[in-house]
Image (spheres, coloured by chain):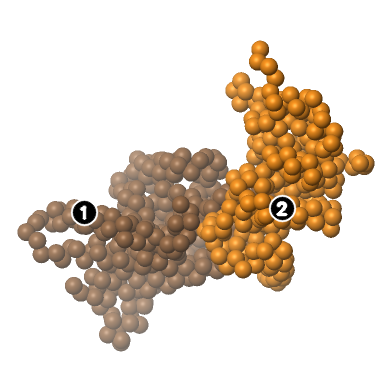
Amino acid sequence: MSVDFWLGVGVIAGIYGIFVLGLQINVGFTGLINLGQAGFMSIGAYAMGMLVTDAGWSIWTAMPVAIVIAIAAGLLVGLPSLRLRADYFAIATIAFAEIVRYTFQNADFAGGNQGIIGYDQEWRDISDWLLDRLTPLGLGDLTQLPLFLAIWITFTLCLILLKLLQASPWGRVLKAIREDEDAVAALGKNVFAYKLQSLAFAAALAAIAGFFLSFNVTYLYPSEFDPTFTFLGYAALVLGGYASYGGVALGTVLLWSVMEGLRFLQLPLGTGQIGALRFVIIGLILILASMLRPQGLLGRKAEMQLRG
Amino acid sequence: MSLAEDILAIEGLEKSYGGLHAVAGASFTVGRGSITALIGPNGAGKTTLFDLITGFTRPDGGRVRFEGKAIAGLPPHRVARLGLVRTFQLTRVFAAMTVMENMMLAPRDQPGESLLGLIAARGRHRQSEASSRDRAVALLRQFNLENKAGDYAGTLSGGQRKLLELARALMAEPRMVLLDEPMAGVNRVLGRRLLDYVAELRQSSGMTFLFVEHDMDVVMTRADHVVVMAEGAVISEGPPDYVRTDPRVIDAYLGRPAG
């Protein structure tokens, strides 16, 4: 188990971390069950990839524009579906994510199943530059280190921003919507507008996670963004704690340490079987966790019980 | 009593669900600064009427005017922003938020409630938070909830929740409050205290109250105007003494012979 291997785990955990921060603001702090997060992530990543490869943009202008496009997608999905009851909203969002994925899979402009390649040169340049600087420290062999650092610095900045927002009156309204949206409306707050903003934040965070995912895998193809990504995100959210931004980091690191660490199990099984066994074990951990600690590692038990 | 000015005027309000006329052409007015009771047998349409006035349900027909402005069909938050705030029959506190957070949510037009305001109006936002907190502390003291400020609202008793809901509504600085069964599930001592606050507030700030209540003792002693609904329509209104002896009211409560 080399350091590079665990850096790789940290990279995946960090990408999920940013992705799940977006789920947390929806699920944990607004009470919106967003099952379409992978859809927003693919729109962000593809928008960036296409702006660079097709339109010849610099990645540094492509990324902010791609975030705006993902936010616009969030608003577009939210406008009709946020008026639905919570469970129908969840269904609408997963349908949206699947529509996006199948579109990318079958549309010529998105490269179909071949996907998109060759958008990440500017990132590679930065990564190499950083590795050169790290060589005198004896860290030059850790090729994943620049990405790892970029991801976790981004995660930390997003975490701080979200915590500040949650402590503000704006965050207070979101939390109250989670508790009882009619009572919030009766006090003169435009619930719909707040839900849209919450969804916009989730979409933006998903897009950022998508950029890092695309740097990590070096090419974009549709099946990276299947609903499993969202569901594993929920697993990390449940594990780390409902309505806790700090729990997101803990949950994703834990989930991916177990997922990847299990590869080293010495069992008389084929690799495919061990791969499947990982999900069985994760499932068991989730069941145990929900029995022993339903609020998650950093969630608040009292709040969970009061909500009933 | 002089009916110098009406704060709320309801005209021919209608709402049907399938074949059921929940509210069938109800009309009445509420005088500014009055404490008006809305009574009627179960199923008379009182809660539906509240929902229609406050925008939670869209009327099929009729008009609602609040301070001269037509409000029928406006969404709930727009109605509330005009200064018409309601409470609910089944108390709705934000259970997993503290009592203080419940209070702090309520004031209207807080600069820190918008993302833009958080960035552009930091000074005003701080000021507004501080003054809201002062008002919240004062109100909680008045309602004997100051020791509960840091507790989750979900841990309060039923009566304390009713008090919190009223206190929270007052944080929004309404000109009129609609109370849907403020006494339901509240012990008599707390209930009386709640009504004392209502009377005080009307006295001190001229606030108007419209409340649904089943306890006739309370209605007759606390309200200065009574509106009686039955089967979706207003069948009588006037001072308590008049309504009490109105044969139509007695009919509605005791039931008419079948047929």
Q: Which lettered chain is shown in brown? A: A
- Find the distance from the CA under tag 1 to the CA under tag 2: 59 Å
Q: Is residue B169 visible from the viewing direction of this image?
A: no
Q: Is residue B48 above or below residue B177?
A: above
View extreme (left): residue: A268
Pointer 1: what residue?
A280
Q: Is residue A170 left or right of residue A280?
A: right
Q: Secondary structure at mark 1?
A: helix
Q: Nearer the viewer, residue B216 or B180?
A: B216
Q: Quadrant of the N terminus of chain A?
A: bottom left
Q: Amino acid at mark 1?
A: Val
Q: Residue A238 falls in which quadrant of the image?
A: bottom left
Residue B2 in the image, given as x and y percentages of width and height = 93, 41
Which residue lies under the disc numbered 2?
Answer: B192
Determine whether, in the image, residue B101 is placed left or right of residue A112: right
The spot of residue A274 in percent (x, y) is: 15, 57
Closest to the observer, A214 or A279: A279
**Residue at position x 84%, y 55% in the image:** B203
Q: Nearer the viewer, residue A107 or B82?
A: B82
The chain identifier of the residue carrying mark 1 reads A
Colour representing chain B: orange
- Chain of the residue that carries numbered disc 2 in the rendered image: B
Q: Callout 2: 10 Å neighbours few (<14), some, many (20+)?
A: some
Q: Is residue B163 left or right of residue A204?
A: right
* Residue A2 spot, x, y in % from top left: 20, 74
